[in-house]
Image: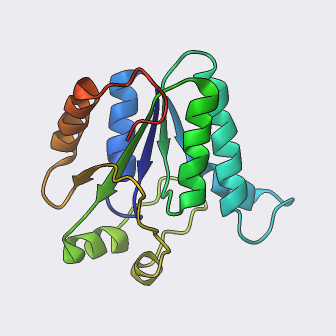
Amino acid sequence: MLIVFSGLPGTGKTTIAKGLTATLGAVYVRVDTIEQALRDSADFAGDVGRTGYLIAYELAASNLGLGGSVVVDCVNPVMESRRAWSAISSRSGAPLVNLQVICSDRTEHRRRVETRQVDIPGLAPPTWQSVMSHDYEPWDREPFTVDTALISPAQALAAIADYLKRSDLSTPDQG
């Protein structure tokens, strides 16, 4: 199973994705970690976003090929990346579960962004302005969404676990 967490920075994706990874015993792929490693390399300069995603796709595919589940933690803001995850799902024969994390309370979301503790050495945290100006395209099929302004991380994990139990995950490219 390929589970892709999507959403703007500061919504709580990483907290929930790490929790689900531990619960499922899955492989965890975090695009921020890949992108920062690329930035730290003397071989790359400038925008590493596309390259980071390309690496994440292949890491996910190789781990799916071993028969395990993969949890991906990324912003996943554009149709191009969403289609690529669907292609990885199809190619691997693993069901795809798209999960979106939002924080509908702008004041709380801003507080989280501005007080965020970075857990990746060298990663510059986003500013509130960069989060608000981030390109985040509408979905063609609405993913399962949790709103962390309304529920705790533990409640979000429980809602996701319930969703996974209720979903038909026998075929690739699920919601």
x, y (%) of residue 114? 35, 74
In the displayed structure, 68 sits above or below 96; it is: above
Q: Is residue 12 left or right of residue 75?
A: left
- Evaluate whether residue 37 shows in this view: no
Name of the residue lying farthest toward the top: 67
Q: Nearer the viewer, residue 86 or 5?
A: 86
In the displayed structure, 17 sits above or below 115; it is: above
Seen at 34% across and 49% down, the residue is 143
In the displayed structure, 83 sits above or below 75; it is: above
Q: Nearer the viewer, residue 80 or 45?
A: 80
Q: Is residue 57 left or right of residue 67?
A: right
Seen at 56% across and 43% down, the residue is 85
x, y (%) of residue 9? 41, 64
Name of the residue lying farthest toward the left: 150
Q: Which image quarter holds the C terminus?
A: top left
x, y (%) of residue 133? 46, 82
Q: Nearer the viewer, residue 2 or 126?
A: 2
- Evaluate whether residue 147 shows in this view: yes
Seen at 49% across and 69% down, the residue is 125
Location of residue 4 (image quadrant): top left
Number of marks in the image? Answer: 0
Q: How is the image coloured?
A: rainbow
Seen at 67% across and 53% down, the residue is 52
In the displayed structure, 162 sits above or below 152; it is: above
